[in-house]
Amino acid sequence: MTTTKTAKPPNPPTGGGLGNAAKTVLRSRWIGPIGLLIGAIAPILIATPYAMNVMTSALIFVMLAVGLNIVVGQCGLLDLGYAAFFAVGAYTSGILATRLHWPLLATIPAVIVVTVLAGIVVGGPTLRLRSDYLAIVTLGFGEIIRVTANNLSITGGPEGIYGIPSLSVGGVDLSNSVVFYYVVLAIVACAVLGANRLIRSRLGRAWRFIREDEDAAEAMGVHTYRVKMAAYIAGAVWGGLAGVLFGAQLSAISPASFTFLQSALVLMAVVLGGMGSTPGVVIGALFVTMLPEALRGLSDYRYFAFGALLIIVMVLRPQGLWPARTRETARTARRSATFDGEVRIR
């Protein structure tokens, strides 16, 4: 009579009490609603025009970072011209609202269509490229959009477009700074939730396959070109909608707002927060936008201190402030798997 012993899985490593508490907080499902609650309470604590402007700008930047996270963090496509889609959305809504007198809300479907077309036009011939080549092409696309906006009469040339109306729903004006903040908060919350659901879908799993090893993903049956195109278009739509909010906040746009520096800042937020991690990217975007404002008391040394803090953060947290999980939950894996073990996306 023989007996067989089943090997027990290794016990998870145990850390200190503080480390376990931090892991529990990071994995909590309530962290999203808690963050939304903090955002809703913030205007009650401080509602000066300056504070509302900074917080609204930070929320718009969060939407940009979440969109770029789909492209860079999930699919591994290095995009250095992401501000181009930001500009396409802002200019499309601005032109329709000021030249044709459309309500700003009515311009959103047109913005989505134009940004999708822009994503297809740029991504169609370029997504077959990899790594450095793709980065150079996207960088060139960003500059083409900025230079074009700087030289066309319909875009206002270097002076840009002024007099963009604020958001209104059913004749109710939402231009009040506090009201507009809450509207932007609700829109950005929906955008973050939508991006997170997209990342957890079967398509999001295919994006991660491509990010880890494109050749292996193609060998497994993933149509890499179509999947990369889907990521590029999704990022373009998120950037275009952020442009609509940007134009509504400032009521004016100009080519100076869509330079390479803007693309670099959004990419910095994604890397700093943790590539591929939605909560990390949100924290990274808030860090990049709000920390320089918190350091205004240092006057001329403000950006020196900001740069030093960025270096300290990247040394202490090289994977980002909130890195993405290396293992997927069992629920996500079941949802992504097919009956025959193959990936369905082709």
Image: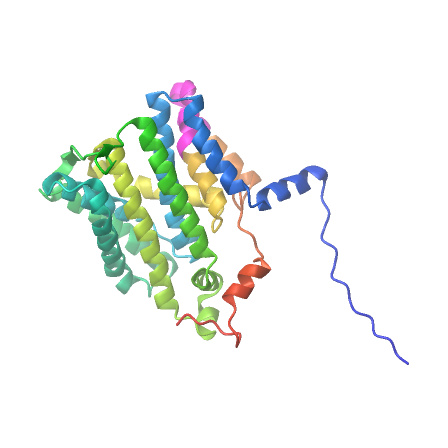
User: In percent of the image, x 68 and y 42: which residue is there?
Assistant: 20
**Residue sitting farthest toward the right:** 1
Q: Quadrant of the N terminus?
A: bottom right
Nearer to me, 99 or 274 = 99
Q: How many marks?
A: 0
Answer above or below: position of 267 versus 182. below
Whether residue 27 can be seen here? yes
In percent of width and height, residue 39 lies at 44, 33
Nearer to me, 99 or 285 = 99
* Figure colour scheme: rainbow
Whether residue 146 can be seen here? no
**Residue sitting farthest toward the bottom:** 1
Residue 298 highlighted magenta (yes or no): yes
User: In percent of the image, x 42 and y 39: which residue is there?
Assistant: 285
In percent of width and height, residue 21 lies at 66, 39
Which range is magenta?
289-306
Answer above or below: position of 330 versus 249. below
When asked about the image quadrant of residue 224, the answer is bottom left
Nearer to me, 117 or 273 = 117
When asked about the image quadrant of residue 190, the answer is top left
Q: Magenta span: helix, strand or loop, mainly?
A: helix
In percent of width and height, residue 8 lies at 77, 63
